[in-house]
Amino acid sequence: MKDIDFKAYVVNEEENNYLGKITRRKIDDLPEGDLLIKVYYSSLNYKDALSASGNKGVTKSYPHTPGIDAVGEIVRSEDQRFTIGDKVIVTSYDLGMNTDGGFGEYIQVPSKWAVKLPENLSMKEAMIYGTAGLTAGISILRLTELVKPEDGKIIVSGATGGVGTISVAILKKLGYSVTAITGKETEKKYLSDLGAEEIIMRKDFEALEKKPLLKTIYAGAIDTVGGIILENIIKSIKQNGAVTCCGNVASAKLELTVFPFILRGVTLIGIDSQNLPMIYREKVWKQLASDWKPDSLMDSYDEISLDDIDQKISLMLQGKLKGRTVINMSK
């Protein structure tokens, strides 16, 4: 087993430049772990693009194989809960950040990172979801505890991104009226097809009046971008509404008063999918495989090989991708 060599996308640091290329590696090159997994699919996330471009806040040392998502089959296990041949999902924790990730044909990880692939979910579907789907699922789990479809509209920011597209589709399936915020004028039909009943351009939402409170319009929200978008969402939430927050691509800063919270009872819920306890991971993956699975799931992804990864990373960093990008490791 140790002598197996396999294909992986490896990023090297050369005089402050970060260059990725496909190379051959050996099992012995991988970090220690009690599960060895043959990867069938991975997916591209914003953290992967940051890791591949040398962001030391994501990945501290190079050479490194990104890929915060992986699904595959166990080929060696030192944990009695898992047997050879089990199909498992590994997302978040340190995978693809400082532990070699899913952009390689094999990963070696602690067994506590792995979730058995639920029934009624294929490996490809698991990676169409990936960390984005898990994050969307946690957001929906928390939001639906406080906000019901009859309470009013839900607004989703970054709606053409991975978390956004999955959130729109699941919320629609659960009977919510969904408003989508996007910066992409050309993607209105795409969002409508996913289930958005109303679409607002990002520039228009950012241009709302700078007041401590705005007109109440939405019962709840899933925010994926932060910054002024999140500020204006919070200011527009109805009495006792709720907002989940999982991203900061627009900005990590908020300029708010406490008025939405103490005058309207708005709840702001932080979403941390990286360190989510396993009991909740298993619950969310079970829902994603069954009641929450959108009818449009197979329409919201692009399938590529490792050979295509550089181009997709570049497009992601430019904000030009939509939906999910799945990497077929056998291509």
Image: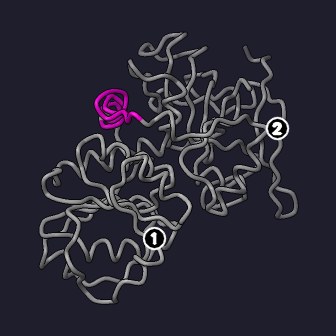
Instruction: Point out residue 293 in the picture as x, y percentages from the top left corner.
Output: 36, 33
Q: Secondary structure at mark 2?
A: strand
The way the protein has been coloured in the rendering is: one colour
| Distance CA(mark 1)–CA(mark 2) | 39 Å
The numbered dot on residue 201 is 1
Give left or right: position of 85 versus 225: right
Q: Amino acid at mark 2?
A: Ile
Residue placed at 36% from the left, 36% from the top? 281
At a point 53% along the width and 47% down the height, the residue shown is 323
Q: Quadrant of residue 280?
A: top left
Residue 56 belongs to the span the image colors magenta: no
Q: In the image, what residue type sits under mark 1? A: Met
Quadrant, the N terminus? top right
Q: Which residues are magenta?
A: 280-295
Residue named by callout 2:
22
> Can you give x and y, in whole percent of width and height, for residue 188 in the image?
48, 59
Percent position of residue 246, x then y:
40, 58
Dot 1 surroundings within 10 Å: few (below 14), some, or many (20 or more)? some
Q: Is residue 36 above or below residue 112?
A: above
Viewer-proximal residue among 1 and 190: 190
Q: Is residue 228 above or below residue 26?
A: below
Numbered label tally: 2
Helix, strand or loop at disc 1? strand
Most distant residue in the right direction: 15
Outermost residue on the top side: it is 84
Q: In the rendered structure, are the residues bearing label 1 and label 2 in contact, judged by CB atoms less than 8 Å apart?
A: no
Which mark, by number, is residue 103?
none
Q: Main secondary structure of the magenta part?
A: helix
Answer left or right for 140 relative to 229: left
**Residue sitting nearer the eye, 307 or 253:** 307
